[in-house]
Amino acid sequence: MDELKPITAKVEEGNEVVLVLPKPVLEMLGLENGETIKVSIHKLPENYNIAEVANENFRQAMDNSLFKALIERIKKDYPTLKMKVTKSMVAFYDNKKGLLWVEYPRGRKIRVHLKKRDYSTVDYDKKVIPSGWGGYPEFIIEKEEDINYLMRLIKFAIS
């Protein structure tokens, strides 16, 4: 992918800003043309670059062997999924729709948020928390075997 140029805007505090984003950015966000998102504008340090923060957080997370194995397995088993790195997680999209969001590790656990769906028919060990962050089902990865379990959940989510 071509490198995207940063979008900059000078905004007076309290004023509303509307940005028309290029199609590649909309796709990275998993949005269709015409969809909107609201973002709070906070005062940021002068040389703040969200892409650098996201990439540094991702690099640090990849030092965790379980997280690295998970990301590599998802990319290997589902090469058509689009991956988006943010400052707090890695998101995977299937046909521009959010499929799963993998938080960076906290301690020995990795929290995965799944596409909204009823997983009870494939969640044999009852490991999926039906309604977590934002009402999205959650799955916690604590060991290598959990990755195999998650792959079955992803396969179901895509079907």
Image (cartoon, helix red, strand yellow):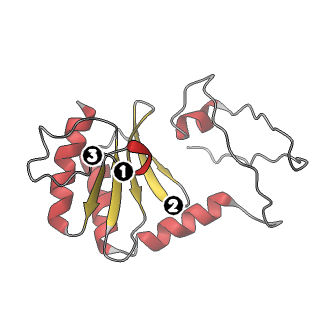
Residue 42 spot, x, y in % from top left: 76, 56
Report the residue marked by disc 3: 130
Residue drawn where x is 31% and y is 46% of the image: 137
Question: Can you give x and y, in whole percent of width and height, for residue 23 in the image?
Answer: 62, 30
Indicate the quadrant containing the C terminus: top left, top right, bottom left or bottom right.
top left
Going by the image, does 143 lie left or right of 137? left
Name the residue beneath numbered marker 2.
88
Q: Nearer the viewer, residue 154 or 69?
A: 154
Looking at marks 2 and 1 on the same chain, the residue that comes earlier in the sequence is marked by 2
Q: Is residue 98 above or below residue 148?
A: above
Residue depicted at x 56% and y 60%: 87
**Gap between marks 1 and 3, in whole Å?**
7 Å
Q: Mark 2 and 1 residues: CB-CB less than 8 Å, in contact?
A: no
Q: Secondary structure at mark 1?
A: loop
Residue type pointed to by label 2 = Ser
**Considering only vertical position in the picture, is 81 above or below 23?**
below
The reply to whether dot 1 and dot 3 touch (C-beta < 8 Å) is yes
Q: Amino acid at mark 1?
A: Gly
The structure residue drawn at horizontal position 40% and vertical position 75%, both measured from the top left corner, is 63
Residue that label 1 marks: 132
Q: How busy is the neighbourhood of tag 1: few (under 14 within 10 Å), some, or many (20 plus)?
A: some
Vertical side of 32 occupied by 70: above or below: below
